[in-house]
Amino acid sequence: MRLELKVDILGMGIILWIIFGALVGWVASLVMKTDAEQGSFMNVVVGIIGAVVGGWLMSFFGQNGISGFNLYSFLVALLGAIVLIAIVRALRQTV
């Protein structure tokens, strides 16, 4: 019983991270005007990687990174996703 509860919590965490990543990636693609180039899957990828990048950037500046599913974490992930899209855009233009 206890093992099943942990698996359910882990599964829900993964689902929430995918939803959170999709939302952050979608908003970042709207801000950076790349929404037409990205599909739903890329929005999820950009959002999740953006959360990691944003968390790293915030810790670099001595602040907290992603702290859960709240507005602060959304803004940190959004910052990271925008930075990620800007870097990818710059790399595409140089190639």
Image (cartoon, rainbow, N blue to C red):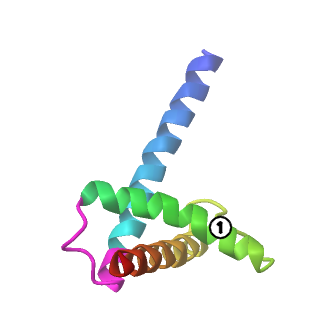
Tell me the chief SS of the magenta region: loop
Towards the viewer: 73 or 38: 38
Residue farthest along the front direction in this orientation: 95
Residue numbers of the magenta segment: 28-39
**Which quadrant is the N terminus positioned in?**
top right
Instruction: Provide residue 15's location: percent of width, then percent of height.
Output: 43, 44
- Identify which residue is drawn at 64% across, 64% down: 66
Q: Amino acid at mark 1?
A: Gly
Q: Mark 1: give few (<14), some (14-19) or many (20+) Cα within 10 Å.
A: many
Residue farthest along the top direction in this orientation: 1
Q: Is residue 7 above or below residue 66?
A: above
Towards the viewer: 62 or 7: 62
Instruction: Provide residue 55's location: percent of width, then percent of height.
Output: 65, 67
Residue farthest along the left direction in this orientation: 36
Q: Is residue 94 on the magenta stretch?
A: no
- Identify which residue is drawn at 39% across, 55% down: 19
On the image, numbered disc 1 is attached to which residue? 55
Instruction: Provide residue 84's location: percent of width, then percent of height.
Output: 48, 72
Instruction: Provide residue 11's location: percent of width, then percent of height.
Output: 49, 34
- Residue 31, quarter of the rendered image: bottom left
- Residue 39, quarter of the rendered image: bottom left
Drawn side of residue 52 relative to residue 15, left or right: right
Q: Is residue 73 above or below residue 93?
A: above
**Which quadrant is the C terminus positioned in?**
bottom left
Q: Is residue 34 on the magenta stretch?
A: yes
